[in-house]
Structure formats: C-alpha cells, structure tokens
Amino acid sequence: MAAILLEEGEKVALMMGNEAIARGALEAGAQFVTAYPGTPSSEVLANLSRVASKAGIYVEWSTNEKVAFEAAYSAALAGLRSMTVMKHLGTHWILDPLAVAAITGVDAGLVIVSADDPHPHSSQSSVDTRFHGRIVNIPVVEPSDPAEAKDLIVWAMDLSEEMKTPVLFRYTAAVAHSKAPVRLGPLRLEKRKPNFPKDHPRLVSIAPHARANIPKLFERLERVEKVFEGEPFVQRFGPDSGVWGLITTGVPHNYAMDVLAAEGLLKKVPVLKLIGQYPIPEGPVLDFLRSVDKVVVLEELEPFLEDQVIRIAKLNGVGVEIYGKNTGHLPRYGEYSPELVGRVLSDLFDVNYPALTLTTSDEVSSSVGRRIPQMCAGCPHRGSYLSIKAAFARLGVDGLVFGDRGCYNQGSNPPLDAIDTCIAMGSSIAMAAAAKKAGETRPVVAVIGDSTFFHGGLPALVNAVVNRAPIVVAVFDNRWTCMTGHQPSPTSGVNAIGDQAPVLKPEDVAKAFQIPFVRVLSPYNLKAAEEAVVEAIRSAESSGLPAVLVFRAECTLQVLRRLRRKGLRPRPMTVNPSACVGCKECIKTGCPALGFDEELNKAFIYEDKCTGCTICAQVCPTGAIVREG
Amino acid sequence: MASANVDEVNVVLAGVGGQGVVVASDALGLAAMKAGLNVRIANVHGLAQREGSVYSHVRMGSAVYSPKIPPGRANAVVGFEISEAARHLRLLKPDDGILVVNNALMYPLAHFTGHVRYPRREDLLEVLESRLEPERIYVIDAASLAIRAGNPRTVNVVMLGALSATGVIPIGPDELIEAVKARVPKFALEENERAFWMGYNEISGGETT
C-alpha cells in the first residue's frame, strides 16, 4: 500500500492513521525522519521507509527514541524539516534533550509524533504524553481521525518552522490503527542543503546561555497561542449557543459526534474542538464558555484540557458548570468509546445512547474467555525459556527471571509462565543485577531481546560488570525487532531502506566488556541449552561477574516467509497415536501448533501451523512425536 | 447500487489471527468508498500473529463519525469463527441485526492446558441459535467452501460473499468482488472470486459454476 504515499493529483484514499501520517510527512516537506518501532506507532516509518529512496528523503530506525529525537533535532537545527516518531513509552526517553531543544528552538520544522495507548493494548503503562510537551513548554496538537492526522502533520510542521519551536503531535491508538478516507494534498519533496549553525550562545546550552534563552521560549509560546486561536487549530460545530456544550479533542470528538448525530442533536449542542491544546487558546475557549450553561470536556486519559478550561473559567469569572474527570463523570484511564461517551452524555442530558443491548447477548459475549497470546509456533524463544526452566529444575532452585520488552513477553502467559517481571526497555539487566547486589541468594537471570539489548540494555550491562553482579544475561537474538513487525535491529545486517549494515553481535559486546563466560547457543537443542544455562549460573557464582548466553535463531516468521517465497514449506511433525500416552508434556510448551483430543486422550499437531522445530518431540517422554512423511 | 443517502450501516468482522479479517474489512471499506459512502474502519489486531482475537468494525454512511461500533448498533456480525462471533454478539442490533457465522471453533492452546475453557462448538451454536430468530442467523461451513474454491486461506472472502448475499450491506456483489480483487495477491484472484461466489450462493441458494 506504500505506493499511495507518492501519488500525485486529486485523490481520496482509504488510509490507516499511521499511513496518513507518513503521507503527511511527505506533504509537509519532511526530509529527515527517525523512529524506534513501538505499537501503535510503527507503521509510520515502516511505510515511509518503502518510499524514502524514491522520495529522496532520509529515514532511519534509530537505536532508541532518545537517539531518534536527537538525530531529528540536529537535522532541524541544520535547516532540514524533520520528524521523529515513537510510542508514548519512547517519548518518556526523550524528555532530557527535548527540554533543551525547547529552549534553543529549531531552525527548520521539527515534529515529534507521540503515539499514546490509553487502553493499553500493547504497552506496560499508559501515560498521557501531552504533559511532556507542557513540561518543556512546546506546542501540543492532536488529530481526531486519519484525514486530520495527515493535514495536522503539515500544519504542525509549518507552525514549528514559523515559530522556531519543536511541536509535539500527540495521537492515540484509535487514530493510529483506524482507517478512513483521506484526501491527498500536494507532495512537498524538499531538497534543502544542511547548514548546521555555529551559534554558541544558543546551542552550547550551558547555564548562563540557558538563563538567557529561557525567556525566549515563553515569548514563542505567546505567539503560538495567537495562532491556536484561529482555524484550523480550533474548530466550532453546531449552534452558536446552547444549554449544554462540548469541548473535545482527538477521537473522543468523533465519539461525541456519533452520539449527537444518532440523537438528532447536531444542531442543538455547540461543540468546540481543540486541535491546538497547549498553549490553550484562551479567547475562543472563553467565548465558548460564555455561550453555554454547562460544558462537558472530552479527551482521552488525563484532564489536560479540562484543567486548563476550569482555570480559564475561574480567572474570568464565568459561572459555567464544567463536567468531566474532575467531577467523576469520565475516567482518567482507559480507552474511550462511543459507548462510554454515549453513557456519560445520557447521564448528563436528554439522550439515551446506545442502551440497546440485550442482557442475554452480553451474557453470551462475556462467556467466551480471552484468547491468551502465545509465542508463535516454532518460535525460538520457547526453547530458550524451556532450557532456563529445565536448568532451574536440575539445580533444584526457584530462580528469578527478569523479563524485558518484546515478543518474549508472551512467555509470561500460561502454560510457560516463565518470567517474573516486565517493566521497561532494558530494565531486565539493571533489576537483575540489583537483585543480586541487594543480597538475593537464588540464581538470577535477565532475559532480553537483541533490539532491546542495544536500545536500553547496554548501560545496564556495563553497570552489572563494574559493580560485579553475578547474574546470567540471556540475550534472545532473533535478528529482528519482531513484536512490532520485523523492523531491522542492529543484529539484522540491514537498515531502514534496505542498505547493508554491519551485523552487531551481543557476544562481541559482552567480550569487550570483559565478561568471562560468553556462550552462543541454539534454542532448538534443549539438552545442550539446559547444560549451558547450568554452566552460566555456576560461572556467575564462581566469578562474581555476569555470564552472557546468546540464544541465537532467526525469528521463525522471517524464516517461513523466505521459504514461502521459494515455494517451499517446512516439514511438520506428527503424533504417533499409539505411542502417545496423553501426558500433555508437549502441550505445556505452549506451542499453538499443538492440540489435544480429550475423547481419545491423545495430542495432535495442526499440520498447517507446525514449523517442524522439534521442541515438542524433545520434551515427549515416549518418543511419540516424529517428523511427518 | 451506489447510494449516498445511507445513514449508518455497521458491520463487525471477527476471527482469529491468520484468518484474514483485516483484508476482508479493507475490501468492504474500499467497496463502500467506491459506492460513494463515508467509511470508518477500526482494527484490533495487535497480537494477531500470536493466536489472539482479531476484529474489525466497518462503518458506512453519512451519519458515521468514529470508527467504533457501540453495543447494539451492528447491522451484522460476521464471525469467521464461532467463539469470536459469540464474543461480539453484544454489538448486534437487538431487533434486526444478523449473524453470519463460520461453523468452526478454533480452540486456543490454553483450552487444552485447562487455563481457559471454551465451550463445544455444537453447544455454542445452540446458544447462538436460541438467542436469534432463525431468519437472523446464517451458519455456513466456510472452511469446506474455501477448500472447494481452491484455497483454504479464502475463508475471509467466503464470509464476505455470504454477507453480501444477506442484503444487509448497501453494496452490490460485483462491486464488493472488485474491491476484494484489489486487496488480495495477484496470483490468487481466481480462487478468491470463486470463494466469494461460494459464500454468496450458500446463502442465496444460487449455483456456483
């Protein structure tokens, strides 16, 4: 679908929010775009990388979000319109340089695209990153659907360049992954030459310089507020006045419009949509508050707008009643839905939306249990986890496994139940080392994927070495950033646009850090891997230093994809029913290619799902699982 | 059959990772857009590769703003798998919404380990049939039809064909099939077209040649 990104002329295309943002970058003259993958943001750079060479723009998957931000900031200082894309968790990583960038300002447009996950669908926390813009005092904007997202990238880029400030573009999962018709605008493919300024009083931001420049930041904000007072950053719908009014932003705006449309209230309830949210445009908000008696503020996550609206009403003596999170009518967490907005509006004024379901349907729907995600059939992580568990069992210990962020999170689910923590990028190594330093006597293993190892694991590994933490670091190296859709990792040997890159090896890093026990092994040979884990635990204990195991096997999905392209298929395994005793040892590996016939008391294998990795055959006590054919 | 004066038609497509829910919703959305309708699609597919539930909401019409279908407002729930159909039953319009369901139950691995218990296929079907009048539930064996069409992976297009034959969506079958062809791999056009008519005729009672 990437071809649409470079199409010219009048056209309306059905686009996913992230695809629309990628197109927006090309209409905004973005010449330098960086990202670290993370749901729900990954498709932006994934799409741009497919057309980057043709469009003549630079794109990169950076090592982490802080690097991605600093790269885009540097290019913006050099005069190139730039954009950096990340999920909310990554936006936490960039606050330090972002705070300085807010003070120095930029020479060309710089848009930071920050994808929030309010539900959360695929995140370990769900913080409202609009506050990151507010903390450092840069403009914050938010779109409500894919079409607006595309246009807003252009508006934000123009605003950024005109006001010489980075702009934070916050959006949420429902916009990122929904699809809607998007009217394409003209492409703007810039060919600017970089000219990095030698501007010491601004860019050498030592304290005296920072002190001199901080006031300019607030002057810029004042000018931005003037821009935010007009369209398109503020939009009004419905009548000029009413009893009830709504102040909206983001996708909740459209949930509200659904409710008003269904209830015939579009012409009765005035709506103020704020695309520019910080600095809040006081004039239009004040006018709106004076035109209604009561107002509901609708936004996902924190009362970011609501608190500002309350402040404006209070300072200007407007007696309007303001409903939202502060009054307990709306939640401060979770993803909003038309159902939720409908229920709240139904409680407050004369609507009854949706309130249509039959309780019997609810019963049926809630009777179906959740599908617990598993690692894919044939996934190498399965063997890695099984060997760690087997090593603990052999040593008779209840070891601790500190997990990290990636596909291998699925190892926390039953039946594997193989990790004890999942916190943040790189936390596994830091927390594992600290556990030992705090006096933990059980064996401690840190499990971390290759992309995460380079993203956030390196400083923690250095820390574990110099502070002598006797832990086992198990790097699950499957050569790609798989959880988010197989983006290149430093171990892939290829970069965002498909150019060859050096293949970085975690074992080389470990050796350079003078770690005495470093072993590379295959996760598909359970016995040998178990032995290696036992040795690593013993080595850590005897040397008083970390031991590093690199479990190396490429992601099965990538291997299968290449096979399929050659017209080949893997040879699946099969269960010999006369040898199967129904012990379910194979099922307990958590491989979705396995099933169990309860009437016959025998396991079976879904031929179309099995990749023939042999893990189940290796755990089968009766040798009942064999290669088919 | 293009009609720009449709207010709101909502379709839920629900299945399991790998069943092609997202492709089917794209095709439906493209066809609706071609027919001059406003369209919104919501996808939840975060863990599709990892045996999770996958669903799409496809909304068409002039009164449609957001991509999500609230409970009780779906004109059709199309279940590519029976437990996923049941999971989304609460979205169905209580008076006249229809259910199109593939008569297959795909047990998650956790069912076999005892961590989650799923009902038996025939029991769940009985529950669904007890909740809806007979003219509002269409049960088809999409897997067999897909195999007859020449590719077991065309279950999604069989289901679209069946949906088309129910007459619930404001798009003609020929328009929908064109959108399907725009969205599936070039080498699989014929089998997808056959799959579409297999599903269509299963409901309409027509003959597939």
Image (cartoon, coloured by chain):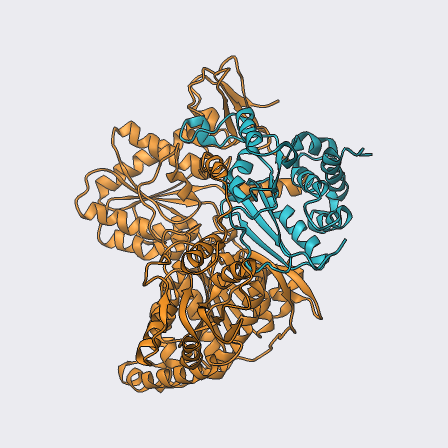
Is A501 positioned to the left or the right of B148 in the image? Answer: left
Residue under the image location 34 percent in, 35 percent down: A388
Please identify which colour was used for chain A in the image: orange
Is A553 positioned to the left or the right of A463 in the image? Answer: right
Task: List the single residue furthest toward the left.
Answer: A439
Q: Can residue A57 be seen in this view?
A: no
Task: Using the rendered view, name the quadrant where residue A343 is placed.
Answer: bottom left
* Image coords of residue B125 (percent x, y): 56, 28
Residue under the image location 55 percent in, 74 percent down: A154
Is A536 positioned to the left or the right of B72 in the image? Answer: left
When the figure is inspected, residue A453 is found, relative to residue A193, above or below; the finding is above
When the figure is inspected, residue B137 is found, relative to residue A143, above or below; the finding is above
Task: Using the rendered view, name the quadrant where residue A7 is placed.
Answer: bottom right
Give whichever of A27, A275 is nearer the camera.
Answer: A275
Please identify which colour was used for chain B in the image: cyan
* Image coords of residue A598 (percent x, y): 48, 19
Give whichever of A520, A408 is nearer the camera.
Answer: A408
* Image coords of residue A484 (percent x, y): 49, 51
Residue under the image location 55 percent in, 55 percent down: B67
